[in-house]
């Protein structure tokens, strides 16, 4: 079976300690030669400058293809496109285009009076503005604001029609969640190979569980039971590695060509899973089912 391609997501540091952790994470994962790495954008655009600094530094110091997250939140069209042009001038021509989460306390998303109303407008403007590779978000489980799961698929199709090159899904815990979504997308006329599954290695189950509930990802009861027992036995890391490796292996056996890891700026578990899949610095990428 063809080897998996991998990519990684990082977030910009907000403190000196977090900065050291980010660079340690990048150093550990860069030798795996990812297709690309992405750097997130804080809710409400709160890390705009930090994101820019992280993106340009990673690209310059580690010779990686970096995709910068860009949102529609709290900025005019002109300001948003100027950020994109600044990236292009620095040699960064990959963007993850998202509507973005509203600032805390605002409630629902409200576009800037002179800004992009949604991700479709942002995607189209980026493709017109320059030679950008544009990735977008996708939701294998119903987005909290979507009328139903079919609406999510149709919205994703419109993103591709607007010019998106690839989609990265929200994380999920069971392979069937992604595979069902992939089948729906395929029936809707979307090239399923253009949808990357988002994988979140479970470094801390209680934290990831809270994150999942906040984003609308379903939490299987068996995971609660498994981590409860693992915590009592001191086997959380072993369980997390085994579960993530099994999830990835199942996806690969179902023909998924690439995996995108949400690292949370912690490299060890992501690296161990990649190693288990045959993705190492010294060995050609090979995956054996």
Image (tube, rainbow, N blue to C red):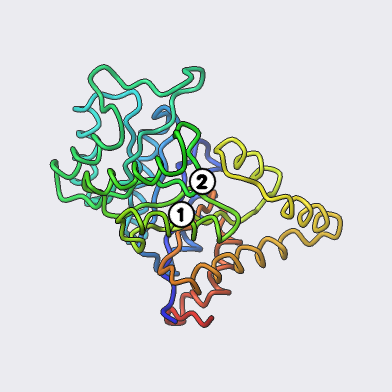
Percent x, y of residue 235: 78, 62
Q: Disc 2 designates what residue?
A: 141
Q: In the picture, residue 64 is in which quadrant?
A: bottom left
- Comparing 246 with 18, the one in front is 246
- Report helix, strand or loop for mark 1: helix
Quarter of the rendering occupied by the C terminus:
bottom right
Q: Disc 1 designates what residue?
A: 181
Percent x, y of residue 14: 50, 36
In this rendering, position of residue 210 left or right of residue 216 = right
Question: Could you tell me how many numbered marks the image carries?
Answer: 2
Residue 84, above or below 72: below
Percent x, y of residue 163: 21, 48
Residue ID at (79%, 53%)? 225
Residue ID at (35%, 47%)? 55
Q: Are marks 2 and 1 in contact (CB under 8 Å)?
A: yes
- Report helix, strand or loop for mark 2: loop
Residue 205, above or below 121: below
Q: Rounded to the nearest whole Å, what is the CA distance between mark 2 and mark 1?
A: 8 Å
- Comparing 258 with 265, the one in front is 258
In this rendering, position of residue 2 left or right of residue 105 = left
Few, some or many residues within 10 Å of mark 1 (<14, 14–19, 20+): many
Which comes sooner in the sequence, label 2 or label 1? 2
Residue ID at (54%, 43%)? 18
């Amino acid at each position: 079976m063809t080897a998996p391609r991998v990519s990684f997501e990082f977030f910009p540091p907000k403190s000196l300690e977090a900065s050291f952790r980010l660079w340690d994470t990048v150093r550990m994962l860069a030798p795996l030669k990812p297709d690309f790495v992405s750097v997130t954008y804080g809710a409400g655009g709160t890390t705009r400058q930090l994101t820019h600094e992280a993106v340009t530094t990673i690209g310059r110091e580690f010779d990686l293809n970096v995709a910068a997250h860009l949102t529609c939140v709290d900025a005019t069209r002109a300001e948003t496109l100027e950020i994109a042009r600044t990236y292009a001038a620095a040699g960064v021509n990959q963007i993850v285009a998202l509507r973005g989460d509203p600032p805390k306390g605002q409630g629902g998303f409200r576009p800037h009076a002179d800004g992009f109303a949604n991700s479709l407008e942002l995607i189209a403007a980026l493709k017109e503005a320059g030679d950008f590779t544009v990735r977008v978000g996708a939701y294998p489980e119903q987005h909290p604001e979507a009328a139903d799961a079919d609406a999510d698929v149709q919205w994703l199709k419109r993103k591709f029609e607007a010019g998106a090159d690839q989609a990265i899904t929200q994380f999920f815990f069971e392979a069937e969640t992604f595979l069902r979504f992939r089948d729906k997308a395929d029936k809707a006329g979307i090239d399923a190979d253009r949808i990357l599954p988002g994988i979140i290695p479970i470094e801390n189950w209680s934290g990831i569980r809270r994150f999942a509930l906040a984003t609308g990802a379903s939490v299987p009861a068996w995971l609660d039971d498994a981590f409860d027992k693992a915590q009592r036995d001191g086997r959380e890391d072993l369980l997390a590695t085994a579960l993530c490796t099994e999830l990835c292996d199942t996806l690969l056996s179902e023909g998924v060509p690439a995996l995108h890891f949400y690292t949370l700026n912690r490299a060890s578990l992501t690296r161990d899973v990649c190693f288990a899949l045959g993705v190492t610095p010294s060995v050609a990428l090979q995956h054996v089912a």
